[in-house]
């Protein structure tokens, strides 16, 4: 046996061992996930109110979503059969993640408005089984966070766009053409009404001293239950049917997922401030909705404090484009329809592409005016998108500017001038540790304590 044969045999054995280890890890992870799923299903959880005088018992049903460290389950009230959404976050021994969970719950419970998802219950428990498994490796406590929310059966705006087939998942141009012909687009007036509600909800957060920092189509739910917002003075008309016609969907938009929330501004005093901010943004702000300043090289230390409200404004511009064409402008492009042009007229289709920093820093995609895609909405709509997605954060409009512009376009489309509420009256004491609208032990915390050093 020569040296080359010996090396090849060793290499083959090494590769076999690697494959075996990978398969073992895969099946271990799969079995663990299935075990966790079975462990959670039919489990009964109790959320006590902060006064300790009442409690809410919920039974965990099927898993409906998963992402990162978190799982979302459908849960049922053990006494009334009302359906809830239960979010479970496996924090392990990560104390920073524990604090982030508490901060997310605190932000949810700081507001009481139908456009912001309401927190019904919160608890942080120590998992005895997880603790037993970790004791030999780590002396820290193993935590699992539970948050209880209303179950909004309308799903997210991303789900609605999928139902409408606005963004076909196929790559073949011919299939794209056929699929887009069956899509059901929002009307311009419906988009403007939906977008107004979304931006107004963002303004509520800002007026409460909070920036969202991860606004996207997936984080906007649709409340299909008219009774949840029937007293809202902002709506036009007085019936559920009026609301459906107004927005084009069966429900009003509701902001969710405040896990990435931050104060309104952050210091850029040192180089470390900038590096930390960009690193956090890469983990907590979705790339296709992230503004140029949150990418590497977008900020310099010593500049004025970063106004995070402008980050939310940028994300709102991406959402507006998504309502029009199915996704953020930085993950699609308009391509010429090759063999299926109608009557010899050039047409365009939407193609999904990978979002990169280069795309975010480049020109916005815009359909050609003479195509069917370009005629879908008035020129005012793309002008609105471009007026929001301004690369220079210092020249980017404020939320108030956007609301005023959208309101003007609604009136131009034949809609009514909106009657805004005082956003400052929407705050309430939190519900950390319980459900309902009672106070809690941390109710006297100011904004600095709300966000803590994790966000500085």
Image (cartoon, rainbow, N blue to C red):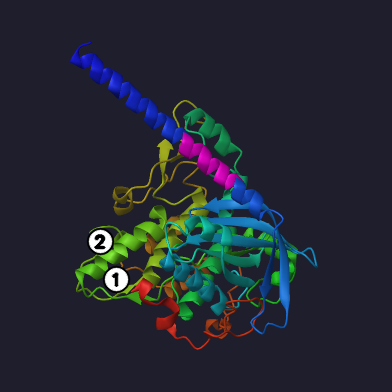
* Rendering coords of residue 117 (x, y %): 59, 69
In terms of depth relative to the viewer, which is nearer, 307 or 36? Answer: 36
Q: Which residues are magenta?
A: 24-34
Residue 160 visible (yes or no): no
Residue 35 visible (yes or no): yes
Residue 112 inside the magenta-drawn segment: no
Would you say 300 lies left or right of 241 here? left
Which residue, given by chain and number where applicable, does mark 2 sit on? 298
Circles 1 and 2, Cβ within 8 Å, touching? The answer is no
Label 1 vs label 2: CA separation? 13 Å
Q: Quadrant of the C terminus?
A: bottom left
In terms of secondary structure, where does tag 2 sit? Answer: loop
Q: Quadrant of the N terminus?
A: top left
Q: Of all residues shown, which one is farthest toward the top?
A: 1
* Rendering coords of residue 402 (x, y %): 45, 69
In the image, residue 65 sits, relative to residue 436, either above or below, namely: above
Quarter-of-image position of residue 222: bottom right
Q: Residue at x 38, y 58 (%)?
A: 283
Q: Nearer the viewer, mark 1 or mark 2?
A: 2
Magenta portion: prevailing SS class? helix
Which class describes the residues within 10 Å of circle 2: few (<14), some (14-19), or many (20+)?
Answer: few
First in sequence, mark 1 or 2: give its number.
2
Which residue, given by chain and number where applicable, does mark 1 sit on? 394
Q: Of all residues shown, which one is farthest toward the right?
A: 80
* Figure disc tally: 2
In the image, residue 348 sits, relative to residue 444, either above or below, namely: above
* Rendering coords of residue 146 (x, y %): 59, 65
């Amino acid at each position: 046996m020569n040296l080359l044969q010996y090396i090849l045999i060793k290499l083959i054995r090494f590769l076999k061992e690697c494959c075996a280890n990978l398969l073992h890890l895969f099946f271990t992870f799969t079995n663990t996930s299935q075990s966790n799923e079975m462990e959670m299903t039919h489990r009964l959880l109790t959320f006590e109110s902060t006064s300790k005088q009442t409690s809410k018992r919920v039974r965990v049903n099927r898993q409906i979503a998963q992402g990162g460290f978190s799982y979302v389950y459908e849960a049922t009230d053990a006494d009334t059969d009302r359906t809830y959404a239960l979010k479970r976050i496996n924090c392990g021994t990560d104390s920073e993640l524990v604090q982030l969970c508490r901060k997310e719950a605190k932000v949810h419970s700081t507001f009481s408005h139908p456009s912001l998802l309401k927190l019904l219950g919160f608890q942080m428990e120590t998992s005895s089984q997880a603790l037993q498994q970790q004791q030999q490796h780590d002396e820290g406590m193993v935590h699992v966070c539970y948050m209880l929310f209303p179950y909004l059966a309308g799903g997210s705006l991303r789900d609605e766009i999928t139902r409408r087939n606005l963004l076909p998942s196929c790559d073949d141009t011919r299939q794209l053409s056929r699929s887009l012909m069956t899509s059901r687009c929002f009307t311009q007036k419906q988009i403007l009404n939906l977008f107004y509600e979304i931006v107004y909800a963002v303004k509520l957060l800002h007026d409460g001293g909070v920036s969202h920092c991860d606004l996207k189509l997936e984080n906007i739910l649709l409340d299909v239950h008219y009774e949840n917002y029937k007293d809202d003075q902002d709506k036009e008309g007085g019936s559920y049917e009026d609301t459906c016609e107004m927005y084009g969907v069966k429900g009003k938009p509701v902001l969710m997922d405040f896990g990435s929330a931050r104060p309104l501004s952050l210091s850029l005093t040192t180089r470390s401030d900038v590096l930390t901010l960009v690193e956090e943004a890469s983990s907590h702000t979705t790339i296709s909705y992230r503004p140029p300043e949150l990418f590497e090289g977008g900020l310099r230390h010593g500049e004025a404090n970063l106004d995070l409200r402008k980050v939310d404004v940028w994300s709102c511009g991406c959402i507006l484009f998504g309502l029009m064409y199915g996704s953020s402008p930085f993950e699609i492009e308009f391509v010429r329809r090759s063999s299926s042009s109608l009557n010899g007229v050039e047409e365009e289709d939407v193609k999904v592409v990978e979002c990169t920093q280069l795309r975010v820093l480049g020109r916005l995609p815009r359909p050609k005016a003479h195509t069917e895609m370009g005629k879908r909405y008035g020129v005012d709509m793309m002008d609105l998108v471009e007026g929001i997605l301004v690369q220079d954060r210092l020249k980017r409009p404020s939320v108030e500017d956007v609301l005023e512009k959208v309101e003007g376009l609604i009136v131009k489309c034949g809609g009514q001038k909106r009657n805004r509420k005082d956003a400052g009256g929407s705050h309430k004491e939190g519900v950390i540790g319980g459900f309902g609208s009672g106070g809690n032990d941390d109710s006297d915390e100011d904004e600095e304590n709300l966000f803590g050093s994790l966000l500085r």
